[in-house]
Image (cartoon, helix red, strand yellow):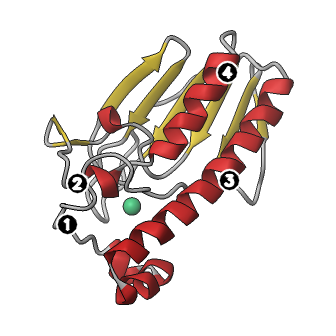
Amino acid sequence: MPASGLQTLHNDTILLGQDGWADGRLGDYQNSRVSLNDSCLIFDLFQAKILGKLQVLEKMQELADFDASQLENDLILAAKKKPKKVIVLTHVPPFAEACMHKGVMSDQNWLPYFSSKVMGDVLSKVATKNPSIEFLVLCGHTHSKAEYKPLDNLVVRAGNVEYSKPEVQQLIVL
Ligand SMILES: [Fe+2]
């Protein structure tokens, strides 16, 4: 989505998105003993991991904050067009309440790696300023179904999936 920019769909709907990164700001990063494959398999994070846990956090936040500022720019551009609805695609859930695992919200150990607070802050800010626009955020990362509605005009949905078995989560009719 960052490469293709804002896409105008039917019925006054705009589609946009940013990758998003977990930012370690929700949950208890310092005391968490979780180590995701992400910090071994993703080059940017692996380089930081060699240096230490604090460096990984700084790298996660640098990546997350950059994407969040890009998202904010795109959301502001979209809002200026006064659409009825904005659909946002991102990878990491932007709120703790959207980080489910086996029907329960992820705990303090996992939340730092499963959520992107900075993205949630940006989405809440723009949605609050634009109450006439409906914002639908679709995310993944946790592989567990979740729905959270922090504001009347902001809904976040995470999809349920197993590795190598992608599935349609819902049809959106515009
Ligand atoms: Fe992921």
* Residue 77 lies in quadrant: top right
Decide if residue 161 is in sight here: yes
**For numbered disc 4, what is the local secondary structure?**
strand
Marks 2 and 3, how far apart in space? Answer: 27 Å
Where does residue 87 sit, x and y in percent of width and height?
62, 32
Whichever of labels 4 and 3 marks the residue nearer the N terminus, that label is: 3
Judge by depth and name the residue closer to the eye, 159 or 92.
92
Q: Residue 131, which numbered label?
A: none
Give amino acid for label 4: Lys
> In this figure, which residue is indicated by the disc labeled 3?
1
Where does residue 48 sit, x and y in percent of width and height?
44, 82
Q: Residue 85, which numbered label?
A: 4
Judge by depth and name the residue closer to the eye, 134 or 72.
72
> In this figure, which residue is indicated by the disc labeled 2?
110
Judge by depth and name the residue closer to the eye, 157 or 29.
29
**For numbered disc 2, what is the local secondary structure?**
loop
Marks 4 and 3 close (CB-CB < 8 Å): no
Discs 2/4, front: 2
Whichever of labels 2 and 4 marks the residue nearer the N terminus, that label is: 4
Which quadrant is the C terminus positioned in?
A: top right
Marks 4 and 3, how far apart in space? Answer: 17 Å
Give amino acid for label 1: Val
Decide if residue 142 is in sight here: no
Marks 4 and 1, how far apart in space? Answer: 37 Å
Give amino acid for label 3: Met
Marks 2 and 1 close (CB-CB < 8 Å): yes
Whichever of labels 2 and 3 marks the residue nearer the N terminus, that label is: 3
> In this figure, which residue is indicated by the disc labeled 1?
34
